[in-house]
Amino acid sequence: MVILMVLIAVPSIGQRIKISNAKIITPYNIIDNGTILIENGKITAVSDKNLLFENAQVIDAGGRYASPGFIDIHTHGGSGYDFLDGTVEAILGIAELNARHGTTLVYPSTASCSNEDLFKFFEAYREADKLNVKGAALGGIYIEGGYLNMEMRGGQDPRYISNPTREDFISILNKGGDIIKRWGFAPELPGASELMDELNARGIQMSLAHTAALYEEAREAFNRGMNSITHFYSLTSTVTRRNALRYAGVIEAGYLFDDVYVEAIADGVHLPEPLLRLIYKVKGPDRIILVTDAMRGAGMPEGSEVILGSRSDGITVIIEDGVAKLADRSSFAGSIATADRLVRTYMQKAGVEMIKAVQMITLTPAQLMKIDNRKGSIAVGKDADIILFDNDINVSMTMIDGKIIYSK
Ligand SMILES: [Zn+2]
């Protein structure tokens, strides 16, 4: 009791932080030469004045940008690891790579696999979450696999693709219902409606993924609570012609429903410049979420060979031109993007201003995941998840909850 009182009366220096001389990216403007005050892991002031803050640790931003930390809601791996390796080492290794590139919150993502491997990953996730001190914080798991349209599986393992059944999804929810925060699946599959109702009732965010749905099926899914589209334009249906008639698909549904969010793999490879511009023109920064969707090759040098998928029976692919390619170079084998690159690419290729590019990987994903009361912007009362970078989005410091976990 006595110790507690002392702590309250005299906060230690580590609990009070002042970031000065920063260009602060807020949701509304960029404050030149601004100051951020942080106490006990929360932002307590944001100002264009050089505020006094006694007994505080001072971080001189040196004129760099202070941005909210990036939030990556869809990523599978990096530094040679995949989350589905199912080890604490892999999860922490990927989280650390993310932190070095400005991500402060990450949603580890799965792919089609056996339930045995999935449950092993859940166990490792819980353990890693306790030990994670140098990596991006873990926001919860994104399940992307299993209940996908076989024709739209892309690189996902067909052996583990099936229609949703109550028995199966309840067994998954029984093991990981508390840590699963997002789930991507094809809404046109038999049994998908029941899955939607279950996940909706549990507050798990649902995304149309690897889907050949017609516009009408997508609309029905939105009515049942699905509200985002996974990697827009990758394995998402568009206009098809059956006999003489044309049918709209998931892409068109994504454009027509204003409230629906779309993920963009803005690595400059998966979406060419005109599509980056088109998506931005129609959906805008309030509804686009930049995602890396990265595989093991993220953070690995050009020319590296890495495994796509499981260590035991995946295929070897090559890192070339900033993307993973099949060995015969006939197709891409996944993204190797980091979050900083997505922001840089959207600015450079689509001419989007920094404040909007940053919004698409900070506040907008926080709103989708309903954590924007704590995360996603630099504002009084929010968690001090703050990064510093230069004009080119080279990240030099990453802070989570007021603790510097990376700096160079
Ligand atoms: Zn995917």
Image: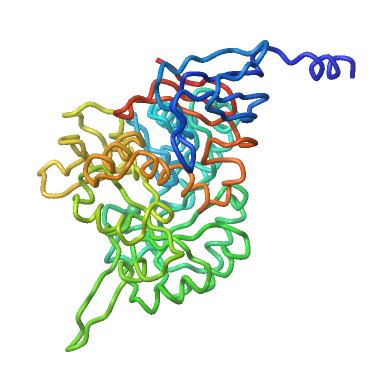
**Which residue does the image show at 49% across and 33% down from the upper left?**
104
Q: Which of the 4 image quarters holds residue 323?
A: top left
Give the answer, above or below, for where 82 lies relative to 164.
above
**Which residue does the image show at 65% across and 18% down from the upper left?**
16
Give the answer, above or below, for where 85 lies relative to 32.
below
Residue 225: image location, x then y, percent: 53, 68
**Which residue does the image show at 37% across and 56% down from the upper left?**
284
Considering depth in this image, is 79 or 85 the residue closer to the camera?
A: 79
Q: Residue furthest front?
A: 49
Q: Is residue 59 visible?
A: yes
Considering depth in this image, is 228 or 276 the residue closer to the camera?
A: 276
Residue 59: image location, x then y, percent: 51, 15
Residue 249: image location, x then y, percent: 30, 73
Q: Which of the 4 image quarters holds residue 401?
A: top right
Residue 41: image location, x then y, percent: 63, 27
Q: Which of the 4 image quarters holds residue 130?
A: top right
Q: Is 216 placed left or right of 107 in the picture?
A: left
Q: Is 5 placed left or right of 202 in the picture?
A: right
Count of residue discs: 0
Which quarter shows the N terminus? top right
Q: Is 103 placed left or right of 298 in the picture?
A: right
Q: Is residue 195 visible?
A: no
Give the answer, above or below, for where 186 lies relative to 141.
below
The colour style of the image is rainbow
Considering depth in this image, is 194 or 95 the residue closer to the camera?
A: 95
Which quarter shows the C terminus? top left
**Which residue does the image show at 48% across and 27% down from the upper left?**
135
